[in-house]
Image (spheres, rainbow, N blue to C red):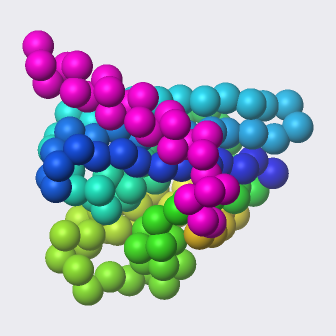
Amino acid sequence: MIKAYIDASTKGNPGPSGGGIVLLNNELYEQDSFAFSDLLTNHQAEFAVFSYLLDDLCERHLHTQTILVYTDSKILAQTIQKNYTKNPEFKKFLNEIQIKLQNFSLLFIKWIPEANNKGADHLARQGLQKALKSENR
């Protein structure tokens, strides 16, 4: 089983955004921070981080394993769990994610409090700093 902790950080609404991911299992411990090129709201950035994670897991052929994703975004967790949103801002992301999820054998997403997601939060803030630096060039 792979555990993934994800978070997003945004300055402005919308604004520059970054993401952070911590992946771990018995043989794996990896951290990733990255900037998004688009201006996103915080909620959009949370969806974008999840989508990025799905792409990364597929590229590394880890999509056949059981994946447990932890997020401190209730909106993201509830939308994915219910497989539904009436918010037009999130529909594009949900449609994209639904297509990607078809490649996964078994994936769960679970909401956790912010206090339990410090590693991904720190990485997301690093990703935001990368976005801010690239914006100032």
Q: Where is residue 121 in the image (x, y as percent from the top left)?
A: 51, 44
Q: Can residue 104 be seen in this view?
A: no
Find the residue positioned furthest to the right.
Answer: 26
Residue at x-position 48% and y-position 84%: 82
Q: In this view, does 22 lie to the left or right of 121?
A: right
Residue at x-position 75% and y-position 39%: 24
Task: Classify 105 as above or below 51.
Answer: below
- How many dots with numbers? 0
Quadrant of the image occupied by residue 22: top right
Query: What secondary structure characterizes most of the magenta part?
Result: helix
Residue at x-position 75% and y-position 47%: 2
Nearer the observer, 15 or 35: 15
Q: Quadrant of the C terminus?
A: top left
Task: Classify 92 as above or below 64.
Answer: below
Q: In this view, does 102 lie to the left or right of 86?
A: right
State which region is magenta. Answer: 112-137
Q: In this view, does 93 lie to the left or right of 106?
A: left
Task: Classify 134 as above or below 120.
Answer: above
Q: Is residue 22 left or right of residue 16?
A: right
Q: Position of residue 7 (x, y in %)?
A: 48, 49
Find the residue positioned furthest to the front.
Answer: 115
Magenta stretch contains residue 57 = no
Task: Classify 87 as above or below 127.
Answer: below
Q: Where is residue 23 in the image (x, y as percent from the top left)?
A: 67, 39
Q: Is residue 134 visible?
A: yes
Residue at x-position 20% and y-position 33%: 37
Nearer the observer, 98 or 45: 45
Find the residue positioned furthest to the top.
Answer: 137
Magenta stretch contains residue 117 = yes
Q: Where is residue 59 in the image (x, y as percent from the top left)?
A: 54, 34
